[in-house]
Image: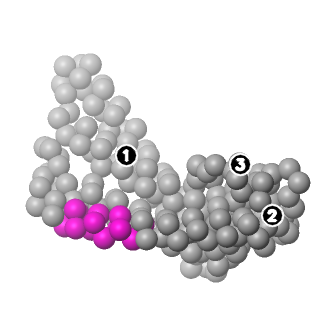
Amino acid sequence: MIFWKLYDGIEQALALIALIGTVAAVLTAGIGRSIGAPVTSAPQFAQLFLIWTCMLGADLAMKRGEAIRVSALPDLLPPGGRRVLSLVSLVLIMPFLGFLAYLGWDLAIGNWQRELGGSGLSYGLVTLALPVGAVLLALTLMRRVLTLGLNAAFEPVLPDLGALGTDRAPGHAPGLAAGHSSEDLL
């Protein structure tokens, strides 16, 4: 699984670079305004970096099962019921992500000629984050289902998907609701 470790490491590095870029652009804009020499393109760079930080961060959270979820109903269900609920969720989420990817790609291509403020960059770089993020999230969900099964597709565990920092011992599943064991996830 060297490919997945490399893939996840690159994604994590890009998310960190985008976050640092967001902070640097906002800081530059703030300092520039306070000393009377505003940097007019800094807000556009902050916008660009922020959307990529959000999309890459959402995928990183999904990989770890840390996406926002409501667990009241799944915690009440037996393993078979949780499996069905996960399947229904996936049947709703995957087409929605496909829809976002499709329309997001059209939006990115349609905005490619538009300039991002005074930065000289294409506005398509901002809108491209939506389809890329949707594809990454769909890929992550598929990896989680194939690796963990339907019961654990949305569980807050760190599966061994080949990602950095996921060297948990087998059977270890932090965040399980009271009364559930890690065997319930499989």
Secondary-structure class at tag 3: helix
- Observer-nearest of 144 and 91: 91
Q: CA distance from mark 1 to mark 2?
A: 40 Å
Q: Is-magenta flag for residue 99?
A: yes
Residue 10 relative to residue 158: left or right: left
**Closer to the camera: disc 1 or disc 2?**
2
Q: CA distance from mark 1 to mark 3?
A: 32 Å
**Closer to the camera: disc 1 or disc 3?**
3
- Residue highlighted by disc 3: 72
Indicate the amino acid at tag 2.
Answer: Pro
Q: Please name the residue shown 58% across and 68% down the image.
A: 88
Boundaries of the magenta span: 97-109
Dividing the picture into quarters, in which one does residue 166 lie?
A: bottom right
Counting residues from the start of the chain, the first of labels 1 and 2 encountered is 1
- Residue highlighted by disc 2: 78
Secondary-structure class at tag 2: loop
Label 2: how many Cα within 10 Å (few below 14, some 14–19, many 20+): few
| Residue 75 image point, x, y percent | 76, 54
Query: Against 167, is 146 above or below?
Result: below
- Residue highlighted by disc 1: 50
